[in-house]
């Protein structure tokens, strides 16, 4: 008896590392001090020593049950982008610059080519956010996961000068809410999605004119990464007063997190186009509108608050970064919370 007979193929692990190396190397930053394959990753903070109060910010998350669609369609090249996005968007939402990322893949059977494909997506997400992929772990766990399934999670660290943290403390009535378009469902609400649509390959591979693609393609569209857009706003000289990453819990849970006591957010639902995949979800699942906005991003992946005087500059900066912004509402005096109208 040996480890391979027990279900763990060490040689496959070595092969996975070799196949993913080229993807990982494409994410490197000058501050990375270690090579691939070490016991830890080292990252120099020398570049940031001139900050008044350098502050580390972190985020960790996974992809959730969206993975089930990747398994069914055997498409694993973009799911890593989702994993990175869920972490680095939270860091950027606090005003931070993502520095590095680490991934964790747990699988029932290590198929090196599949693992390398997953990591290629992680590397793509890191490149989109200028984060270095400095470490990770692939754990082969036979008997715990089915052979053709895996879980994917990640952890990111960023930095911000304490004075530039986005906290909402200066938020006031009259500030304007600007939303950035999502790519679709992103990585939240898939437990409900999988109840609404039949998780069958034939269903997911059906083309829909109103979607402009198959249902599977619409649902697997990778989560938008807003790091460069938020950086562009900052570099334009605009102070982002508050920011909310619209993830699990939709508008009703996430928008209040950006508010301080005594402020109330008003979001106008007809101020931007809602992607057609959400109309399909609502109709097929007979889901009440409030539940849609309490579960999904409904077409806005990030919402930020700026002074009225900074609106035009903010819109231009976001467009220059390649994202689509919309004026979606305002801040009023009142009880902390959000109204959708």
Image (tube, grey):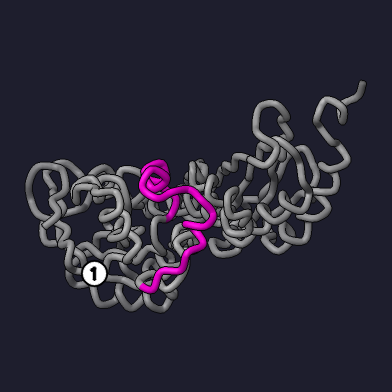
Query: Is 337 positioned to the left or the right of 91 in the image?
Result: left
Q: Residue at x 20, y 65 (%)?
A: 328
Q: Is residue 13 rendered to the left or right of residue 57?
A: right
* x then y, percent, for residue 51: 49, 54
Answer yes or no: is residue 152 visible: yes
The image quarter containing residue 107 is: top right
The stretch drawn in magenta includes residue 187: yes
Q: Which residue is mark 1?
A: 272
Q: Is 298 rendered above or below residue 111?
A: below
For this orientation, the residue located farthest to the right is: 1
Start-end of magenta stretch: 186-209
Q: Which one is in front, 321 or 183?
A: 183
Q: Is residue 208 above or below residue 61?
A: below
Kindly give the residue lying farthest to the top in the view shown. Answer: 1
Where is residue 110 drawn, in percent x and y? Answer: 76, 41
Q: Can I make out residue 244 in this image? A: no
As for residue 97 lying within the magenta part, the answer is no
Q: Secondary structure at mark 1?
A: loop
Up/down of 275 relative to 321, above or below: above
Residue 10, quarter of the rendered image: top right
* 226 vs 138, nearest the viewer: 138
Where is residue 226? Give x, y as percent: 43, 62
């Amino acid at each position: 008896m040996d480890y391979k007979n027990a279900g763990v193929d060490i040689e496959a692990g070595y092969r996975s590392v070799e196949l993913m190396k080229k993807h990982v190397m494409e994410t490197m930053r000058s501050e990375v001090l270690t090579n691939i394959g070490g016991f830890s990753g080292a990252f120099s903070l020398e570049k940031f020593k001139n900050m008044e109060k350098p502050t580390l910010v972190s985020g960790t998350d996974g992809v959730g049950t969206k993975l089930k669609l990747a398994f069914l369609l055997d498409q694993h090249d973009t799911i890593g982008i989702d994993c990175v996005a869920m972490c680095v968007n939270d860091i950027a939402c606090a005003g931070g610059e993502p520095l590095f990322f680490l991934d964790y893949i747990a699988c029932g059977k290590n198929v090196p080519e599949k693992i390398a494909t997953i990591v290629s997506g992680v590397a793509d997400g890191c490149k989109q956010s200028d984060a270095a992929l400095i470490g990770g772990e692939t754990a082969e766990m036979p008997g715990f996961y089915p052979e053709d399934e895996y879980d994917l999670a990640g952890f990111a660290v960023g930095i911000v000068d304490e004075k530039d943290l986005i906290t909402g403390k200066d938020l006031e009535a009259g500030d304007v809410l600007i939303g950035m378009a999502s790519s679709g469902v992103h990585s939240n609400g898939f437990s409900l999605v999988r109840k609404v649509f039949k998780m069958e390959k034939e269903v997911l591979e059906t083309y829909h004119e109103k979607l402009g693609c198959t249902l599977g393609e619409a649902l697997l569209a990778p989560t938008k990464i807003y790091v460069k857009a938020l950086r562009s706003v900052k570099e334009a000289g605009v102070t982002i007063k508050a920011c909310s990453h619209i993830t699990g819990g939709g508008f009703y849970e996430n928008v209040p997190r950006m508010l301080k006591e005594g402020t109330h957010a008003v979001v106008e639902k007809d101020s931007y186009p809602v992607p057609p995949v959400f109309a399909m979800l609502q109709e097929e699942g007979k889901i009440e509108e409030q539940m849609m906005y309490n579960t999904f991003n409904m077409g806005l992946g990030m919402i930020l608050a700026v002074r009225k005087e900074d609106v035009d500059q903010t819109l231009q900066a976001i467009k220059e970064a390649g994202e689509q912004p919309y004026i979606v509402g305002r801040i009023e005096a009142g009880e902390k919370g959000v109204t959708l109208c």
